[in-house]
Amino acid sequence: MSVEIAPKIFTDRINRIEVSATMAITAEALKMKAQGIDLADFGAGEPHFATPQHIKDAAIDAIQKNFTKYTAVPGVPEVRKAIVDRHAADFGSNYAVDECVFTTGGKLALFNAIQVLVDHGDEVILPVPYWVSFKDIIQYAGGKVVYVESDEAENFRITAKMIEAAITPKTKAIILNTPSNPSGAVVSPADLEAIVRLAHAKGIYVLLDECYVYLTFTGDVVSGGSFTDCKEHMVVLGSLSKTYAMTGWRAGFALGPKPIIAAMGKLQSQSTSNAASMVQKASIAALTASQECVATMRADYITLRDRVLAGLATVPGLTCTVPQGAFYVYPNVSAFMGRGGMKTASDIAGGLLTEAHVVVVPGEAFGTSEHIRLSYAVSADVIDKGVERIREYLTKLQ
Ligand SMILES: Cc1ncc(COP(=O)(O)O)c(C=O)c1O
């Protein structure tokens, strides 16, 4: 009797990755909202602000002028020039236009950079806690993730020493995300410089995710691109999503050595081609107009951070580090494990969603088991309502 073997449908590479946990939570929250449930939603990592008017106007103008066709794959020269000029003005970098590729969101810049640099068996160093997508994108490329644990008592700080200890002959790249999603930790300028110089000396690539760089609250902001003598091994990954409240537009970029940028352009030419033409025009407006809107939003985030921290401090048993950037808090919920049948952060996040109608993301998605992530890019009212619900729910857990 012949035994039927089910044909293998999916590739090994797609089987190596999971659906983004933050997207899964967002989908569940949307379902509950559609049922009319009033949620306090700290789940999605996106600004609650509207995209500034002058950016919207530039896109509308582009459409009216029929700027609606294909462009050069890496973006029109004007948008790439706007990116390198903005970066040079803010961080003292010196990228040329052909050292810049404009992408359909920052996530694609990261994805393409990893696809062109990381091969099967290559090791990529990733500080923990990490943004969900880093791990999966490395694994999709066949790379091996080498985790570097940070210490909560040290505010999840990542140092050059910690990175150095993880380097092996197989290390191809180091991922840094500062300020960090989910912890809000910032790599100090001195440590950033030390890591960039160490990597350059060893021929290892630094993939520096600057998605939240304009939401740094410490004042002293440095980019890896600032160390121009180490450019050969530096790839800066940028996004307009959070800086200009443009998450839905899908506008991102990479800055790096010309051959890497050209390889990313080659990959892009066989996948998405150019990012949307009118989005490129909107991005030029965002990058070249007054940056006052960015400063205003940053100031608001600091106020919201302080509000959510003050609220969470009233929850007995909950502890929370003080984030230095981005718009997330990452409280420790270990005191509640073992109460009310709660064993994991996922159990607690699930209970908060179904019982308290509060959306948070469990720490397992970011590589730690004792935390939940709250995005405080929401209104003050949502913070007050949500924190009160968290307090009530967690206090009642026995
Ligand atoms: C750390 C980090 N990098 C990159 C991105 C990608 O942003 P986008 O693709 O919207 O530009 C995100 C989005 O949440 C992020 O948190």
Image: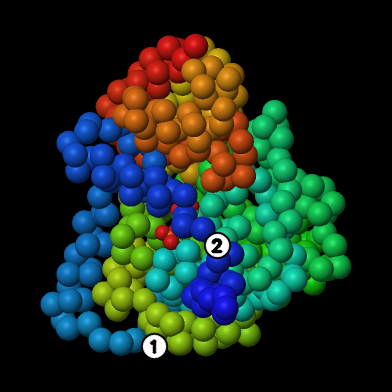
Residue positioned 74% across, 70% down in the render: 122
**Is 395 in front, or is 375?**
395
Q: How is the image coloured?
A: rainbow
Q: Are marks 2 and 1 in contact (CB under 8 Å)?
A: no
**Is 363 in front, or is 111?**
363
Residue 258 higher or lower than 373, as above or below? below
Along the polypeptide, which appears first: circle 2 or circle 1? 2
The circle on residue 136 is none
**Is 253 in front, or is 32?**
32
Residue positioned 42% across, 33% down in the render: 350
Q: Which residue is mark 1?
A: 72
Residue 285 location in percent, x, y? Answer: 31, 66
Q: Secondary structure at mark 2?
A: loop
Residue 283 location in percent, x, y? Answer: 34, 68
Q: Nearer the viewer, mark 2 or mark 1?
A: 2
Residue 82 shows up from this direction: no
What residue type is disc 2 on?
Ile
Residue positioned 47% across, 24% down in the render: 309
Residue 193 location in percent, x, y? Answer: 73, 55
The circle on residue 17 is 2
What residue type is disc 1 on?
Ala
In this view, the residue farthest toward the front is: 1
